[in-house]
Image (tube, rainbow, N blue to C red):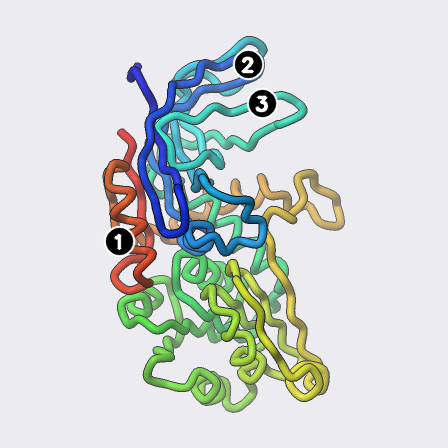
Amino acid sequence: MAESAYRVVFRGPGVAEMEEFPIPQPGERQVLLRTERTLVSAGTELTSLRGELATHSGFPLYPGYSNVGVVEAVGPGVEQPKPGQRLLTMGGHASHILLDLSPEKGEYWQPLPDSLPSEQAVFGILGSVAMHGVRRAHPALGESAAIFGQGVVGQLILQLARLNGCRPVIALDLFEERLRRSEESGADYTVNVSSEDPVSAIARITADRGADLLFEATRNPQTIPVMLRAAARGGRLLIVGSLPGEVSIDAFTQLQLRELSIIGVFQPAAPLFGHHYFPWTQRRNRQLFLELVNTGQVKVEHLITHRLPATSAAKAYSMIHKGRAGWLGIIFEWD
């Protein structure tokens, strides 16, 4: 076992570093994991890095919530998981994670099949974010879907909307490289909003009807008025991205007159315990998403643009902080 652990820390606005800390020892009902892979959740983590998150309580911050690791040791009272087992957890960007399985904490963990590589399994948490967004939309067969923003979550929403029978599925972004990956994700149409008006493009694609479902996954609140103008009558707007700031809309002519719905999507609000009226808990969504990836019905490999040693994390966040060009899925390797 290594003598010390290390993790990513945000020291202040725009400042990401790596720091050492003592490897924790598992106590009663606790599990120590050695991390293999973590996935950057660019929207949430960039908002945190800039100190813009609504729940921001000051620096330092320890980012990350998509972690695949191997159980290294368990404390008293732990029957499952077992040492050597590979798990998906919501641990941060750290070489070692201590899970608390006590009734008071009950932190999430999910065993992984041997057939699912760690760098694909690590998409399970963001996959459940996308899945919760699609469930909140209540898609019907043949409804059109427009996804604004083709980061990782936007690409996963695209694939899940197709699996739910949406046609056509329209991907919109500023960057051609991301839109090429959207085609691999199964987009029927792609729109580069840096060169084409998105409202006109959606009208053209839908024979002037507008989009039935519109998903916001950009981090830019100014997308909302655009989505309102691009929606079909009775359309639903799903706000999935972590939106900082405020936006003004025309409440009567843009929203009320056309009977549109704006729906906030916040994955942690998905239930922890199922009910027969709504059985889709956070755990069940993640398990289903992993099954879809494992069977090839959802693809994530083409979304990975960077596989970096964890020691390069500071450089990665510097790249993210500069803008969205040149990267998409960023995985830290902790081996």
Q: Is residue 254 left or right of residue 318?
A: right
Regarding mark 1 in the picture, which secondary structure is present there?
Answer: strand
Alpha carbon distance from label 1 to label 3? 34 Å
Asked where in the image residue 258 lies, by quadrant, the reply is: bottom right
Where residue 262 appears, as percent x and y from the top left, is 65, 70
Judge whether 122 appears above or below 306 on screen.
above
Q: Nearer the viewer, residue 325 or 211?
A: 325
- Residue at point 66%, 23% (across, down): 103
The N terminus lies in quadrant = top left
Q: Is residue 207 left or right of residue 181?
A: right
Judge whether 23 appears above or below 7 on screen.
above
Residue with the mark numbered 1: 305
Q: Nearer the viewer, mark 2 or mark 1?
A: 1
How packed is label 1: few (under 14 Cα within 10 Å), some, or many (20 or more)?
Answer: few
Which kind of residue does numbered mark 2 sit on? Glu
How packed is label 2: few (under 14 Cα within 10 Å), some, or many (20 or more)?
Answer: few
Which kind of residue does numbered mark 1 sit on? Thr
Judge whether 30 appears above or below 158 on screen.
above
Residue with the mark numbered 2: 79
Alpha carbon distance from label 2 to label 3? 11 Å
